[in-house]
Amino acid sequence: MKQHDKFLNDQFKAGTHLPLIDRFYTLQGEGAFAGEAAYFIRVGGCDIGCHWCDEKISWNPAQHKSVSIDKIIENLKNLKGKTLVVTGGEPSLYNLSVLTKKAHNIGFNTHVETSGAYTLTGKWDWVCLSPKPQSMPLIENFEKASELKVIIFNKEDIAWAEECSNKVSKNCKLFLQPEWSRHEENTGLIVDYIKENPKWRISIQSHKFMKIP
């Protein structure tokens, strides 16, 4: 088990609060649910250290306000869309059991986007696993994955994606996603690869093209 206690105060350990970078109601831009309405909460805190990360502000949780789970749930109650997406940073750093229970109690589906580097708590309707080679997911998180979304920065990342695809269940949906700063170079590469390997789908960060959160 990796050491991540530096991220956790007593409230985070109890699951009553989370350090939030942002929260917003928008359309899911990526993966299996692209185009659907969803409420996102982006938690602070990540020690994965992706060199291409476009959310480095998320790395230090101390920079972000601690928000109560009750406040998060209150913000959900009047929304038409009924999907809560928890992303990061790295959500698996935190106790998410209280959040998912209360979200389910008001009729929400719960989705999480995680590298899978730590034990994933909470009850999830959908687990999007986005593994990173510098911090391998736990085997249990490969088994929980509903969706495998591998970010392609270099051509060599496709071999990593194939390695990961051998560890998920046969029902897991498989996506290759061009890293945003290199999407012009890599989209064609991914398209050609999927044409030869149709078990995969392409995921595009459509929200960035639409200029929405």
Image (cartoon, grey):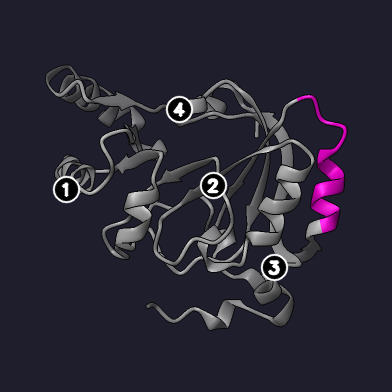
Compared across the picture, whether 3 is left or right of 96 comes to left
Cα distance, mark 1 to mark 2?
Answer: 22 Å
Question: For residue 38, which quarter of the picture?
Answer: top right
Which residue position is annotated with label 2? 112
Q: Earlier in the sequence, mark 4 or mark 2?
A: 4
Dot label at residue 163:
1
Cα distance, mark 4 to mark 1?
Answer: 20 Å
Q: What amino acid is at disc 3?
A: Gly
Residue 78 on image: x %, y %: 87, 32
Cα distance, mark 1 to mark 3?
Answer: 33 Å
Give the prevailing secondary structure in the magenta stretch. Answer: helix
Q: What amino acid is at disc 4?
A: Ala
Q: Earlier in the sequence, mark 1 or mark 3?
A: 3
Tell me the magenta residue range: 70-80
Which residue position is annotated with label 3? 15
Are the residues at dot 1 and dot 3 in contact (C-beta closer than 8 Å)? no
Tell me the residue at 63%/57% (across/down): 43
Q: Earlier in the sequence, mark 4 or mark 1?
A: 4
Q: What amino acid is at disc 1?
A: Glu
Cα distance, mark 2 to mark 3?
Answer: 15 Å
Give the quarter of the figure containing the C terminus: top right
Asked if 198 appears above or below 153 in the picture, the reply is above
Compared across the picture, whether 89 is left or right of 165 comes to right
User: SS of the residue at dot 4?
Assistant: helix
Asked if 33 appears above or below 162 in the picture, the reply is above
Residue 71 included in the magenta stretch of the image? yes
Which residue position is annotated with label 4? 32
Residue 63 on image: x %, y %: 69, 69
